Amino acid sequence: MGDHFRREMAQHGAVEDPKVLRAERDALREERDALQTELSQLQRQPSHELARKTAVGLLVVVAVLAAMVSTVGIWAERNLLDTERFEERVGPLAQSPAVQSVLAAKFTDDLMELVDPKAFFEDALPEKGRILAIPLTSAVEGFVHKEVLAFMESDLFHELWLRASKTAHHNAIDLIKDRNPNVSADAEKITINLIPLIDAALAQLGEKSPELLGKSVDLPTLTVEDIPDAARIKIQQALDRPVSKTFGQIEVYDSGNLRTVQSAVSRFEDLKVVSVIALLVSTPLALWLSRRRRRTLLHLLVGTTFGLILIRRSAFIARDYVTDLSTEPSNRAALNATTSAFVNPLVSAAGWIVAGLIVAIVIALVTGPYSWAVSLRHHLGRAAETTPTNRTADTTPTTDVSTARPTSTQKNPVRKNPTAGTSLGVCTREQYQSSSPKTSDIGRPQLSAFLRTVGI
């Protein structure tokens, strides 16, 4: 076979030089060694790539969870633990018909306790007329309820409501965070003091019907900063009648385990800080470690989108759960309005963030190297080139020199006047050969076409 190969090489004129053969052998050996080295690197690469992919996946999960926790944490601190923001959420509730209905019922019950028209009618009416005490009491209660509703439409009620809510929230936060030693909880209860509001409603009621209290009463001036027990004692002394301990107060917290709440709030604030730091660190680190950053970015965007959608659904479920805690329809409506005032900002913010994330996902996909994305960009580019403006510019009439047919008087002016070529912008064969490149440089087909064009 070797002789046959040599004869074939000899027939093709190949020279069998030992030096050339040795050089080719050495080159083939170097190529073999390089391929073996590359193969060994590829065999070791999967373990490193597996570790890298695992780290990137864990960082993506951490970033998505941190985004969810930080979103809820920032919302909770801004809306539940910040007094100014809490006042913005609670203030409009004073104008809510559902909340006004519940407060009006509470005010009416407390005012009827002060007025006590049933006892008054039983003492004032004769024995046979005492049967009218109950319907007359109902009429008085209706009158009081009507006046209370009118009072709740006044600016005074709105101002007192804001001040009472702000004071109650400030005291509750001081108590939960243990910031003010002068604020303490009575049997670990947190209440909203409505006695100043009831006092103002009672004063307005006394102006319209002085006989309702049975005598002229000098009502004390109460503020929301007054301690509820002290304010209750002042009302009791002014009316000279006993007042219950729950008069004018709404309990906000009464679980009897304040230390647990304090610890939970402290841990919640620490978790919020940790989640924000984890989000800021894990996101860029995952993109830096990833070899396919676009895909990792899409994983981050899609994961965060689904996380925020889950938060929105959880917020709706929590609102419905709190609403269902009450069995009375009026209280259910008030609870729904109250929880909506705090939940709606979270739902709205999450919705806007989800919309922005969806736009980012679309941009990342459309600008990617995927075949459908490349095809889409190609079709969009072609569509942009065929816009009405471009079509108008393309349809401008032009004269094609190769197809234009001269008239009978202009068929070949060069043949009649050899010197006319210069004035007409064309040239004769001799002028072309003297001023143009050689025929071999241009090519005979191009030269023949040019000569036919000028009429030679």
Image (tube, rainbow, N blue to C red):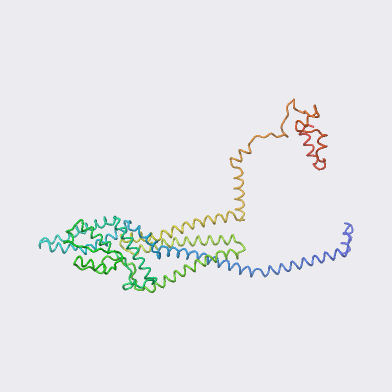
Tell me where residue 313 appears, x and y as whole percent. 44, 61
The residue lying at 38 percent from left, 68 percent from top is 173
The residue lying at 50 percent from left, 56 percent from top is 356
Tell me where residue 60 appears, x and y as whole percent. 55, 65
The residue lying at 61 percent from left, 46 percent from top is 382
Please identify the quarter of the rendering in which residue 18 is found. Answer: bottom right
Tell me where residue 182 appears, x and y as whole percent. 34, 72
- Is residue 44 rendered to the left or right of residue 193? right
Q: Is 214 above or below relative to 411?
A: below
Please identify the quarter of the rendering in which residue 185 is found. Answer: bottom left
Q: Is 235 above or below relative to 424?
A: below
- Is residue 378 rendered to the left or right of residue 117? right
Query: Which quadrant: the C terminus?
Result: top right
Query: Which quadrant: the N terminus?
Result: bottom right
Task: Give the camera-side residue of 256 and 326.
Answer: 256
Total number of numbered discs in the rendering: 0
Task: Give the camera-side residue of 267 and 183.
Answer: 183
- Is residue 378 rendered to the left or right of residue 434? left
Task: Give the camera-side residue of 11 and 157.
Answer: 157
Tell me where residue 247 appears, x and y as whole percent. 26, 66
Judged from this view, the residue extending furthest toward the top is: 409
Q: Is 72 above or below relative to 429?
A: below
Please identify the quarter of the rendering in which residue 450 is found. Answer: top right
